[in-house]
Amino acid sequence: MKQNRIEKIAIVGGGVAAWASAACISDALRGQLVEIKVIDAHTDQVPGIEATLPITQAFNQRLGINEQTLMRETAASFSLGIQFNDWRGPGLSYFQPMAAHGASIEFVMFHQYAIKARLKGDETPFNQYSLCAMAALKDKFAHPAMDPESILSTLLYAHHLDAQRYVKFLRDYAMSNGVGELEANLTDLQIDPENGFITSISLNSGESLIADLFIDCSGHAAELSGQLPDASYEDWSYLLPANRMVSACGEVLDTRPCSSISALDSGWYQCLATQHIQEHRLIYCDRHLEDSDALAVLRKTVGNSGLSEPVIRSFVAGHRSNAWTGNCISIGSSAGAFEPIAGTSLALIQSGLIRLVSMFPDKDCNSLLADEFNRLSKAEHENIRDFLILQYRASKRGDSPFWKDYLAHEVPSSLAHKIELFRAQGQVAFYEQESLPDANWASVWLGQDQWPQAYDPMLDNYDFDRLVDRFNQMKQLISEAVEAMPPHAEFLHQFCPATP
């Protein structure tokens, strides 16, 4: 094994995907004599924000990254979830928290209690049972408590990171582990005709780089994997038709501990902030809206004062059939892409890297490892696809061509089963490689007022009046806890003020 181990790794591309790969792999191989080089042309240097999910904290802990240090260096803020406005109708909103609502009743999920209460005539908004939601809606924040008896133990959070600063942070981390960098563009690659492995790549600097393993972080262009056999792209745009995003950054008007997403006739608008910048995004479909009109919609929604130069990006929702082919592995949007409605972009990068280091190959790149990596990657992307489709299918909109697009096709059988099961009895089918917990799925249905026809009969084993008292007390504890929390901006100033 030592004689056949990977000795040289080339990471092609830049941005978060490339430097997260360099940081993670260099940390995993710390102490081994492995040469890692990132080929980064530094072309994507536009301002923006990376929205994380709780998996990012596990990823950072694995790398030994201190939260306060990361937040200071990236001017980060906290995120307790997403507020959806006008999604289920004009003037209506709901909140998708990072943490589950309420608390499980032994083996029965809390949302089953909410369903039974609703069937009995209780109209309590589901979000009143979420500390994350109630704190975010009042712009409050505190760290979770370690004591499981404390209501603060029900908090779960993620971050909003300045993307440029985050790339620099990861780059510094990786280079401190000995990772090298070449500022160049890929011009060609050489493939062994016998086994289909990449043997070397040519750069516009005139250099030729030989490696044992290649990581494709070149984004939608897929400069490596897109040229290999058996690496076709499975297009899901007929299910998720949004394919464009125009974004611009401006001064921070309010650093809320959440992001907000507002439905518009032509798509949806997202606003999220770090300590230093606030990013405004319009997600749309170019079949229904020209880029010039999208810019006009964004300016009308936000105003044009103090905004950076708008940037338009395109994407095709889908997944590369084989993210690992031969000795080339796709990480990030070269492996699959989605609209940023659930903050899954960074999570997919990090879960892909965790998967890679857990089944790291030797120079032979055993095809069994590749097959398993591809199976798990496909399952993960399909589950996220279904979750995003549900966001639209549960909505009561359908009043414009953009929204009607989401109703034009049958949903995948995997999602159809989930919808039928939840409608019948509030049960959430949970598949392998789910990136989002079952509580998130329930929060979409109930947040968008999609209540099941029945509840889990196991709940009838409990005294319902006592459960009512218990959860009324929980609502009161949540209210008191929120009142005692400091404002989010104040907490940031005390815990992790951003470096200049």
Image (tube, helix red, strand yellow):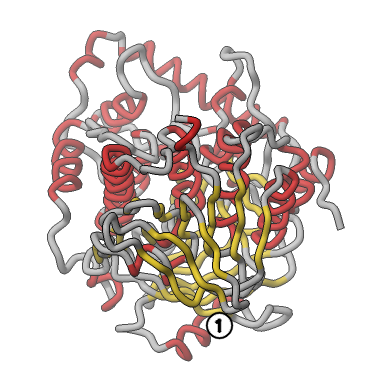
At numbered mark 1, what does the secondary structure look like: helix, strand or loop?
A: helix
Q: Residue at x 24, y 60 (%)?
A: 230
Describe residue 288's horizontal placement relative to residue 414 as left or right. right
Along the viewing direction, whichever of 476 and 453 lies nearer the viewer = 453
Callout 1 environment at 10 Å: few (<14), some (14 to 19), or many (20+)?
few
| Residue 283 place in picture, x, y as percent | 44, 71
Quadrant occupied by the N terminus: top left
Q: Residue furthest right?
A: 500
Q: Position of residue 412 (x, y in %)?
A: 16, 53
**Residue 117: x percent and y percent?**
30, 27
Relative to 1, is 92 above or below? Answer: below
Residue nearest the observer in this picture, 15 or 201: 201
Nearest the viewer among 242 and 478 is 242
Image point (27%, 73%), residue name: 399
Return the residue at label 1: 300
Give me the residue at 13% from left, 48% from top. 413
Q: Nearer the viewer, residue 139 or 25?
A: 25
Residue 85, visible in the rendered structure = no
Choose top left, top right, bottom left or bottom right for residue 243.
bottom left
Type of amino acid under label 1: Lys
Residue sitting at x 60%, y 42%: 34
Number of marks drawn: 1
**Is residue 409 visible to the viewer in this orientation of the structure?**
yes
Viewed as shown, does residue 111 lie left or right of 423?
right
* Image quadrant containing the C terminus: bottom right
